[in-house]
Amino acid sequence: MEDRKSLSRWRLEKAGQCLSTAVDNLTNNDYCSAVNRSYYCVFHCIRSIFALEGIDFKKHSAVIAYFRENYIKSGIFEKRMSDIVGSLFTLRSECDYDDYFIIGKEEVRTQVKSAEYFLKQVKVYLED
């Protein structure tokens, strides 16, 4: 069990590093990178929870689906958490794969704040 806790802490630390990088990217007007790092903050948060269960998935879509089914629908986390991961997943995909996708500073600022909120909620959950 200690290995699971250690892995969970490691993943949560990675989430925090991603958020820090997202803030730096936003400050430097590197909007798509900020969205990417915000998404990965949320992704690593979710995986930090899963580490305690001893589960993981290879596909991002499976990570998100399991989180929604077992942590949103069950009421452990509010629906807003599902909306955050969904929005960031979509925007990250557009930023990374759509050659002509443009995103504005205010939208990116909102996404970075959402990732920060997500991280705080997961930290509270993991402290219990």
Image: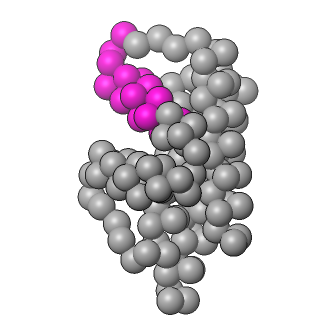
What is the tally of numbered marks visible in this picture?
0
Decide if residue 96 is in sight here.
no
110 falls in the magenta region: no
The spot of residue 9 in percent (x, y) is 60, 71
Residue sitting at x 39%, y 28%: 90
Residue at 43% over, 34% down = 86
Q: Is residue 120 visible?
A: yes
Looking at the picture, tell me which residue is in the foreground, 46 or 16: 46
Picture coordinates of residue 123, whole percent (x, y) = 68, 60
- Name the quadrant containing residue 114: top right
Question: Residue at point 60% right, 18% down?
Answer: 107
Q: Is residue 37 above or below residue 97?
A: below
Residue located farthest toward the bottom when viewing the structure as drawn: 1
Image coordinates for residue 17, horizontal then vertical, percent = 64, 53
Q: Residue furthest front?
A: 74
Residue stretch rendered in magenta on the structure: 84-100
